[in-house]
Image (tube, rainbow, N blue to C red):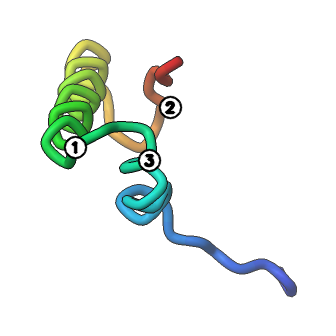
Amino acid sequence: MSGTHATAEGITNPPIDDLMSKTDSKYKLVLYSAKRARQINAYYSQLGEGLLEYVGPLLD
């Protein structure tokens, strides 16, 4: 696997500054993030399976 480099995903991608340009306050960004976390959690709870086996639903 020469030439491949694993990049960190999740909390570092996308950067906070990029997300802040899409909303007008940090408070709203936290609310959007919490809502998305609840959506992902509900999705995996309905599956009843392991977390890393399936890709969750994506937002528009």
Residue at the image position 20 percent from the left and 26 percent from the top: 35
Task: Identify the mark at residue 25; answer none if there is no mark.
Answer: 1
Residue at the image position 30 percent from the left and 19 percent from the top: 43
**SS label for mark 2:** loop
Per the image, the residue denoted by label 2 is: 55
State how far apart marks 3 and 1 are (Cα).
9 Å
| Category of crowding for the residue at label 2, using alpha-carbon neighbours closer than 10 angstroms: few (below 14), some (14–19), many (at least 20) | few
Which is more N-terminal, label 2 or label 3? 3
**Residue found at the very far top of the displayed protein:** 46
Q: Position of residue 7 (x, y in %)?
A: 59, 72
Mark 2 or mark 1: which is in front? Answer: 1
Q: Tell me whether the residue at label 3 lies in contact with that at label 1, contact meaning CB atoms closer than 8 angstroms.
A: no
**SS label for mark 3:** loop
Q: Amino acid at mark 1?
A: Ser
Q: Position of residue 56 (x, y in %)?
A: 44, 27
Per the image, the residue denoted by label 3 is: 21
**Residue found at the very far front of the displayed protein:** 24
